[in-house]
Image (tube, rainbow, N blue to C red):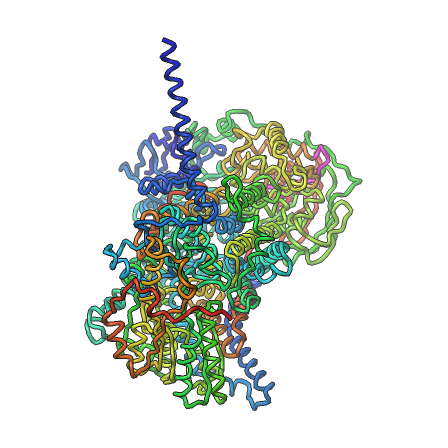
Amino acid sequence: MSFERIKPHFPWITLVVLILIVGIANPSFFDPAGLLTLVSDVVPLFIMALGMTFAIYIGGIDLSVQQLANLVTVIATVYLAEFGIAVAVIAIVAGFAIGVISGFVTTRLYVPSFVSTLAMGFVALSAAKFLSGQRALYMDAELRDASFGWMFGNTAGIPHELAIAVVLLVVAWFLQTRTTFGRALKAVGSGELAAIASGLNVDRVKILAFAISGVFAAIAGLLFSVKLSGGDANLANGFLLLAIVAVLVGGTPLTGGVGGVVNTAIGTLIVMVIRSAMVYLEIDATQQQMVFGIVLIAAIALTIDRSKLRGVVK
Amino acid sequence: MSFIKKFIEQEKISRRNLLLASAYGISGAAAMRMFGPSPVQAATYADPTIAWSYRNRTNPYWNEIVSGGEAFVESLGKPKDSLTHLINEGSSEKSLADVKALLAKTNGELALAIDTNDAPNCRPVVEACAGAGAYVSTLWNKTDDLHPWDFGDNYVSHMTWSDEKPAEQTARILLEAIGGKGGVVHLGGIASNNPAIERLQGLKNALKDYPDVELLDAQPADWDTQKANQIMSSFITRYGDEITGVHCANDTIGYGVLEALRAEGMSVPIVTYDGNPQAVELVAKGDILATVFTNPHWGGGVTAALAYHAATGAFKPSEEPNEHREFYGPTIMITPEDAVEFKAAYLDNVPTYDWKDFWGPSNGQILYK
Amino acid sequence: MTDITAQSAPGARFLTRERIIKWTPLLVLVFLVLLFPFFEWLEDFGAGKEHMYLADSRFFSIRNAARIFIAATPALMVAIGVTFIIIMGSIDLSMEGTVSVCAVIFAFAFIGWGGTLASWAWLAIPVALLVGAALGFINGLVHVRLKIPSFMASLAMGFVGTGLALLLTGGDRIRVEDELFRSLLTVRWFNFPIMVYVAAVMLLIAWFIQSRTTLGRNFYAVGGGEELAHASGLNVNRVRIMGFTLAGVFFAVGALLAVGRIGIAETATGNNFMFVSITSVVVGGTALWGGIGGVWNTLVGVLIVNVINNGMVVIGLPNFLQDGVLGILVILAVVLSTDRKSVSFVK
Amino acid sequence: MYELRQVDKHFPGVHALKAVDFKVNRHEIVGLVGENGAGKSTLMKVIYGAYQPDGGDVLIDGTVVRFQNPRMAMDHGIGMVFQEQSLILNLTVMENIFLGYEQQFVKLGVIDWKAMSEAARRQLAKVKLDIDPAMTTSDLSFAQRQLVELAKVLTLEERIDGDLVILLDEPTSVLAQEEVELLFSLVRDLTKRASFIFVSHRMEEVLELSDRIYVMKDGAVVDVVAHDGADKDAIQHKMVGRDVDKEYYREQKQKPYDEDKVLVRFDGVSSGNRYTDISFALHPGEVLCLVGTEGSGREAILRTIFGLETPTKGQVTIKGETISRFTAQNGVKLGVGYTPRERKIEGIVAGMNVYENMTLSQMGNYASAGVLKVNEEKSLARTWIERLGIKTPDVYKDCGGLSGGNQQKVVLAKWRSAGADIMLLDHPTRGLDIGAKEDVYEMIREMCAAGVGVVLVADTLEEAIGLSHTIIVLKDGAFQKRFDGKPGSKPSLYDLVHHMI
């Protein structure tokens, strides 16, 4: 098999190699139950990265996801008592709305998504601070279990969280590969001008991409909120850069049109392995961040398929 | 020859069955432990892994905490670096994920001391530890509905500091120093953090007795020196000479405030919190009127010690009274008069603590409002 | 012959429009500077106090200008550094790590070599600049040689930088108490502390690099059309690496000023610079897709962001609203200063 | 003087150059022709140093040289004037001219703008262009830019002591007839100093200008013809390896159109200052050709019909419906198809495969409730691949990897399969080789026969005359003259040029 043919497979090869390295250094890493927990813990991050994939796939970025998830943790906690399971609807609507506004500002007002989504994130943060009264809130355990207990059970050893992630991945994959919307996304990501000249409503496609990103961020926030049984305006901090990293390491470059949601699944797992490697390999506390950065550079260098980065590398 | 072939076939099959069975055995047993109900009689461990999970290493407060943890580990005759560090970088998600990874790695043979970064994160961390048979002691962040005694032995203890009273005391020092009139500003921590709320409340409580002092403004500076610096300079613009005193939620905020005042050539009394070595020096010099020492070194050590000794079975948490499971940490007020003395006693030579005296310096059971 | 030269240039007709758009960021800044005093006036008016608009404004005063400048200078240096990169059409997200490392190494060297500018410790300044250059250089190498898009390369390098700073300090903070060094903040000439003048000099140097040196002009060439520049014989990779190196130097200057401002070097010194600086650059009118803008735009952009931050506190806007208002104002500023006719699409 | 001996170049799966011998003498203009994919562009890239050959030698004055990059080639006096505009639009004219060679104007690290401006003025004088060197390049017209490109390459004159070799890659494609004449006279003047390699699809121009002509096919030089012995038919024969019908206009194949029905009607339509007060009607089966120089408003009219540009005045009616909202979606819905000039940018989506490209404008037809029926898409693609003879290994091939002609066929298939009955063709044969061009002409005729109305902006005037029923001549956005181009009454080239300029 030639080098060129292996290239597209680099992301998962990298993943397998990393798993093997960690596992060989510390065989307890291979404990299936432990691995299962590790994987199900990365689910909120994964869902967020999944949404981010859509924004990056069209060549944009969504920096509002973390603040949006913060907002949703607050919404979920504040309104759980009042609306029960319907807070999920409110959360998703909120995510959709903020995504639509980001998309609108980007496409119609020509503000680069880097700035528009960052700014919309600030707006979401303000809303979260306002709603939460700037306090950490927690959910009533009974109410939580009544409405969302199903999110965290186990069926036949499979954590429900993981099942949710798989369902969402399948939905996202279906959206990306099997629907007109997914095809339009690809066209916009690979050749926006050609998409316009083919009569696609490019603005609508882009706005929808940001909206989907927002919806997934909201789901991630909801899941996280239920998991932690509470919410505040900083609860989801730390998600943003990792979500971006997960998408990029999976092999969806910022140039758009390449990669996709399955790549993001692999990318998230890579991030998870690198992160837990810190624990398993007992990396010194003060060295962890540097090691993370260096491994990240190596992983990205390995996983991006440069032949598909058309034109210049910027 | 066919019987030989048959024999080999049979051998293959039984070997495969054996492998399958053992594989199931491992995962099945582990799964039982991970997801089954928490054991009634908690298992104890001869040599559990000791770990500290905290926010970051860039804040001197957490360095003090860690030094306590390391001192405790050394007191067991182990090397310093046998303490496992989990750093969450201010992310609850990472905090929880790291704990789970460590639980998986150690198979639950773990004594964990942790600040869960955000109160809501405490429940899943504790539940995960209890589920895995590990022992956990928490510091600072915990929601009010969560209690160690609801988890048998595995949730060993929770320690926090009642910041309201000490913050009120520093506020009184400040208010006295400005002669009971004028205006003060407060620069707080991350608004939703419990200590930030309590420390502001302390100031408000004190102000009730000083009707001539106005609380001009209170803004969160997120425990960040640079942010505090910028907010303070904006305060100076808005209130100018009306500001006669500054109440800061911690020392790092205080540094930023001091520099903002210095840039203006202003000198306004300020009080801070935490009692970091540098702040204590500034108190000794008179730049800061007062700070509150919460003895993070002891807090970091004893939190790890509680988890460890519970894990080894040296004491049984469920047999301890509630005030031994949820308690306040010690606070020591530092003012210019005693700063030098304090520095000599606590900072220049770190006292050697008896890490088995879990509750000696503590400050009573936690009260909920 | 005449036919070709006499053809009216298609762009010439829009010159006035373009000129207006070019100056919009400055207009936005002026508007904001006049807006916040208005709220002050409104507040005093509501309370029935005497208040002359502007004349009685606390916001609109020299002393507050100095405060805004003090807050803005480190961010300005960082933003200038990243401006060069953005002009090239790339992006640099490594500033937080680089600033932290430079600050920490500077502080260690400064303390170690005497602790005052009046000794050999002044050498810590060039050392810090060299460290910045080296980090930028490595960043550029990773980006160019490993062919990793700059967004990813610099993001990862940022992690490495922060990690390195943490490794060096072990989490401690280092105080730089030298009065001479701190005179950056404490000594004022004509109402403004020395650090403002240092920043002004660096701004002029940046402007000089941008407009009068080959390297500066090459940034625009790369941003305007990298493949074309390459085909014209320009060593684009070299320009890129030098760009990142130059950016690293400016990050280092930013680190020095940040240490000068609060007298503390720590791993957290670099925090929050990333989004603030890039937002400032964009708000100032430098396009993220490259080729347009420059350091003066960045100055205006940084001032806009800092004026908003300062003004919101000064007019007493509730804290929980501040983030959202900043976000909306940033969007408005960018919307106003974007030439929608010259952009075909934005991502 | 400049020589390639037995040069070989391989790419994965392709033997792009096969033992090519190539020679340029002093003061000579060498033509280079060949179909797309014959290896011309690879050969050029080897010459100016963008590619390094795998085998054979590059010699200058008998010495073997090896160029690692274009810069090294330039230092040996080899310069390239690019087909695609290679000026950087946000830079000034003088910066573009001296890009990469600013060092000569740098004193103590400072660029001396005055000196550079003066030097640039001297370069511009060489191409007889009188503009301010400090102008921003984006403000220039296309023709001006082309001349600036030439001026830029001519800086080699001062820089290099020895001889110069200048490659001209399709330099005339954006020029009007008169501008071409000007360029040619310049080139002839400059042979005193430099040799030229002239690459063009316009056979007449190559024949007119070149002293010798290299003919390439399948990566090899198949013939070298001297100017005097050159015969267009013979060369074309060698290029394609088959007979090309020399009867250019093929009037006999043109069918009359249906004059009773109107597909598109323009009534006094203006769009800003791109075009003003344009009126015409397009009928089923008609080829309406818009003729004019670059910037005469031809493309803007096409884009208005498609919906990409909103007119400022006048009324546009498509199939009886007066258009109020100009969007491409609306255009597509009304059955308008658009084949843009920038095929690689606007025509196909590189990175998407053949069937994805073909259904891009009509996904609704291949989906139910938003879910794509991929199998139907593939079978559609297979049908059209066969029908148009698109050369692709399968329907999964990335369109970015197809040759220009096949890309164009994919674009046409996209619109035809969607049932578009108003086709807007902007330079549909641009950059195509003769064989592919013929295919496109054939498709246009087929479409007309099927009742499609075509608005064409042709690559050459001959093409316009040959294909069209109606010709509208534009100049500076204003209507000049309407010609009826029915078989037997075609206007002459002169008629058109006369009104264009």
Apparent side of residue C258 relative to residue A98 in the rendered image (left or right): left
Is residue A71 left or right of D18 when viewed as pictured?
Answer: right
- Give the quadrant of residue C78: bottom left
Which residue is drawn at the image coordinates 34% and 43% (left, top)?
Answer: A22
Magenta stretch holds residue C107 = no
Query: x, y percentage for residue C305?
Result: 48, 70
Nearer-the-camera pick, C149 or A42 = A42
Q: Residue furthest top?
A: B1
The part of the chain drawn in magenta is D448-461
Magenta segment includes D451: yes
- Residue C235 % position (x, y): 35, 51
Location of residue C68 (image quadrant): bottom left
Provide residue C43's location: percent of width, then percent of height: 57, 83
Above or below B348: residue B34: above
- Residue furthest to the right in view is D260
Say above or below: A83 vs B166.
above
Which residue is most to the front?
B319
Relative depth, front residue between B75 and C268? B75
The image quarter containing residue D427 is: top right
